Amino acid sequence: MVSPAPLVSDADKDIQAYVEGLARRSKAAGRRLAAASTDQKNAALAAAAKALRVNAPRLLDANAIDVEGVRAAGKPEAFIDRLILTPDRISAIAEALEEIAALPDPVGRVLHATQRPNGLRIERVATPLGVIGMIYESRPNVGADAGALCLKSGNTVILRGGSESLNSTRVIVECLAEGLKAADLPADCIQMIETPNRDAVTALLTAVGLVDLVIPRGGKGLVSLVRDQARVPTLLHLEGNCHTYVHEGAEIAKAVSVLVNAKLRRTGVCGATESLVVDRNIAGRFLPLALDALGDCEVRGDADAQAIDSRIAPAEDADFYTEYLDAVLSVKLVDGLEDALAHVATHSSGHTDAILTEDPAAARAFLAAIDSAVVMHNASTQFSDGGEFGMGAEIGIATGKLHARGPVGLEQLTSFKYRVHGDGQVRP
């Protein structure tokens, strides 16, 4: 068993100066990374994946310390599940790095080109964003995904994982550093904040001129803190109050199968369905079969749903706004498509919402009307994931509408600049 990761002593330093020092090192490393070739970045990712596999026993030991800490603190099982690493999960993290390496390099893409009548050639070209601060809770794999995505997209990153995953994050960052060293790139391309002091988050959010973007990935409290305190640009990842709507044109067996996966495959992920919406015309046939298949999942519903199946507990109004991240599901009966659209629009967090139906017109109407980052037809909401979208991994699901929306992968981690090519032109 490894020892807990030594922490940077809060008493021995000024938190603001410490974080700004990390940011300055990131900025300096970014100049080297910007000049790196695609082959060099891919080599770093391949070497990091190898280091993760080699160091899997160390990572499991470090993770065991983290898990023991949260169990002792009485955290719920869904929270603990997000923190736990297993050999299979470590293998999946390494595979994600290799998948990112196999993707096209987003930097340097010519997004648009035009030639003006005066002969000037103007190109819009994809460029890195710069220094990214990544703030996340509990899930150690987020640090690996964020580090890999930022590296491939030419960005440097400062990771601020939750204090509960500090030991796991330390080992993951060391493995990423091994990859950078193998590719002759500076280890400062991927750094972590090594103190659990919450003032470090504020310091990151206020590092104007040093940090180009902060991305929070966690619960409502974290996102609210970032939104309220940030003085640097942010890309918000709000909670996933995701809906699955069973339309009267649904195929019942298919709908039951999709719902069970959407709710129970992993209850602690942001793409898990938290609220079930069912057309009244199909509810009597669908709900008993759904509850059979959901097993021990607690279902809370309105009075009409309770009247159909006694296993459904009473729901309060707050249930329809809640991201449970646990084996709990709210259910609401509606009178057709328009009623369903109104309910989802009112209660959804704008993350991912799905319709289950064999009626193509109803599907088209739902996909057009629901203004969430991801909308689905006849598929589990748990597919709302960068890896499943072919991005290799994701740094989060952006629920806003500016710059990026939905799974944030390589392309979404770039901005652009204009390159203008002339031959002595002067403006009249």
Image: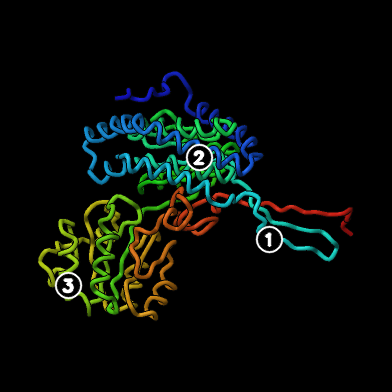
Q: Quadrant of residue 124?
A: bottom right
Q: Are marks 1 and 2 in contact (CB under 8 Å)?
A: no
Identify which amino acid the numbered label 1 is placed on: His
x, y percentage for residue 347? 33, 63
Among the two numbered marks 1 and 2 on one chain, the one whose residue lies closer to the N terminus: 2
**Sooner in the amino-acid sequence: mark 2 or mark 3:** 2
- The residue under label 2 is 46
Kindly identify which residue carries mark 3. 304
Residue at position x 38%, y 79% in the image: 360
User: Pointer 1: what residue?
Assistant: 112
**Visible residue check, residue 228:** no
Amino acid type of the residue tagged 3 in the rendering: Asp
| Left-right relation of 354 to 287 | right
Q: Quadrant of residue 244?
A: bottom left
Q: Quadrant of the N terminus?
A: top left
Residue 109, horizontal then vertical, whole percent: 65, 54
Residue drawn at 50 percent across, 48 percent down: 100
**What colour scheme was applied to this rendering of the protein?**
rainbow
Q: Is residue 38 above or below residue 397?
A: above
**Could you tell me which residue is drawn at 41 percent across and 28 percent down?**
195
Question: Alpha-carbon distance for marks 2 and 3?
Answer: 55 Å
Cα separation between marks 1 and 3: 55 Å
